[in-house]
Amino acid sequence: MKKLLTLLLIMSFSFGYSQIVATETAPYFENFDANFNPGTGTNNVGSTIDSSWYRNNLPWGSYTEYTWGGGTGATSSQNSGPTSDHTSGSGNYVYAESSAYDEKRAKLSTPYIDLDTLSNPQLTFWKHQFGADIKSFSVQLVVNGFWYGTKYSSVGNKGNQWDKVTIPLDQYVGQTVGFIFVAWRNTDFPGNGLADIAIDDIEVNNVPNCPTPSPQISESTSLFTLNYDASGSTGLNLSYDWTFGDGNTATGATGNYTYTNPGVYNLSLKTTDACGQISLSTKTVTICDTMISAFSHTTLGTSLTFDASNSSAVGAQYLWDFGDGSTGSGKIVSHTYASTGNFNVTLTITDLCGQTYSINEIISSCGQPQANWSYNIVSTSSSGMTVQFFGQNSTGAQNYFWDFGDGTTNSTSALPSHTYASPGLFYVVKLIVTNDCGNTDSLQSSLQNISVDELVMESIKAYPNPSQGEVIIELGELTDSEFSYSVFGLGGRLLLKDVAIPINGIFEMDLNNFNPGVYVLRMETSVGLIQKKIVIQK
């Protein structure tokens, strides 16, 4: 009797709302993989639907351009419609193709579904509502042939994703129901036809008895790659939505993701069960690159500053061992050694991922020594000239080596006394100082020039040297307009004395009467006595 009543109701009211052509018994499932075939071209021409379903425009319209039909993969409209189905990613769905005309409504009617077998029924399906020209999407309900109004409505563009819709049917237990899916385009003719609306995975069944879902995140990292796994989560028919903390997302229980930059990120998981219950879980993940460990140092005496700024590590800890029993921490540190010497300094870097790398370097705490010396002539006689040397004004020096310029040396004292066989200030003396770290410095000068500005002395040139008799003196940094000069033999005998009047910083000497040999030119200038060795060859 009920079936007959249902049939009569269908016949009586179908002209007003839907031409429903079949009746099914719940539970009812449809994933559109069979008998919902895609068509061709921008308008999905030739698409089909199952014979138990019905499609058309609203009865008062005569247009058929905006209509429902089977689909697979991506629709023909860019920036509208899905790129794959919801069920498997490779199956079919049904959608309203909207590439032509505007302000049109297309409807799709399900078979009638007998709810006699269900005690707490509901309708669930997945919809894809992506496109700038979408006006609305709605679901209308027909009960026993009577239109019961709109039970679900969604306005505008909802983004490029599948969203689940649930409509309770508990008040219609024992009744026969049908559903009309209505797609509606905007009025902005000609528009761009961006209003492809799709549905998939329709189910009419009892509301599931769902325990509270419990999302569980398991993760591991390898450099920039994150491996994530939520398969240990509990709940009924869970769906999984991931956010990686850098603006990117993914779905599915497991997967891997590669970050662009190292850093600390919040990995979030949202699980949704068959009852629509949502649970959230978040974990912190640290992404680290391969470490580069390096440091430099600057020295000021026994105080050193160490700098590891050129190392690359995320959130790293820097630990220093200064090699003298002392330690420090930080990217840039300073340390003062109690004594001079060589020390094995070790830097250990540990990043947030637990990676550890050490580097060491032998460091001198002495600083660079600086040689300095002066002298006094103690006595001069026919038997020689005794000179007292003073090297104690050298800085940072522990060892002294003297070359007195006459073939003899001394390495035992900072204050040596030396007797030259022949008196004279033409001897070139060199002091080399060394610290405990092996760093060296030297100062070399003639006795005559030890107090003369070295820049001035080094700028004065004599050429040609050796010479056959004519010698040119280029004064360089010396700016005297007139000065006295003398020429001595190596034995100290005065051979020539005259006054030089330079022209453009140059004066000439005529030594053509001198025999071949080595001579000493002594210039009495405003900056002191300056000596040059002159060689005569004929």
Image (cartoon, rainbow, N blue to C red):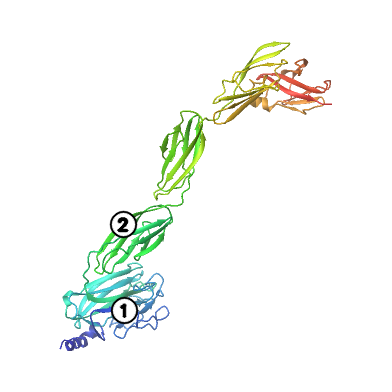
Q: Residue at x 26, y 75 (%)?
A: 139
Vertical arrangement, residue 154 with respect to residue 390, above or below? below
Marks 1 and 2 sit apart, C-alpha to C-alpha, by: 42 Å
Between 12 and 94, the one lying in front of the other is: 94
Q: Nearer the viewer, mark 1 or mark 2?
A: 2
Residue 350 is situated, as x and y percent measured from the top left of the image, at 41, 46
Residue 192, given in percent of the width and then of the height, sits at 39, 72
Q: Residue at x 24, y 77 (%)?
A: 204
Q: Which of 145/56 is in front?
A: 145
Quadrant assignment for the N terminus = bottom left
Give me the disc on residue 483. Answer: none
Compared with 206, 414 (above or below) is: above
Of 162 and 358, which appears nearest the observer? 358
The picture quadrant where one finds residue 13 is bottom left
Residue that label 1 marks: 106
The residue carrying mark 2 is: 282
Is label 1 in a helix, a strand or a loop? strand
Which of disc 2 and disc 1 is earlier in sequence? 1
Q: Nearer the viewer, residue 221 or 309?
A: 221
Q: Position of residue 177 (x, y in %)?
A: 21, 80
Q: Residue 5: which quarter of the image?
A: bottom left
The amino acid type found where label 1 is placed reads Ala
Crowd band around label 2 with a 10 angstrom C-alpha radius: few (<14), some (14–19), many (20+): some
Q: Is residue 159 visible?
A: yes
Given contact means CB atoms under 8 Å apart, are the residues at marks 1 and 2 in contact? no
Whether residue 477 appears in this view of the structure is no
**Residue at the limit of the structure toward the left, as seen here:** 1
**Where in the figure is residue 186, as x and y percent of width and height?**
33, 72
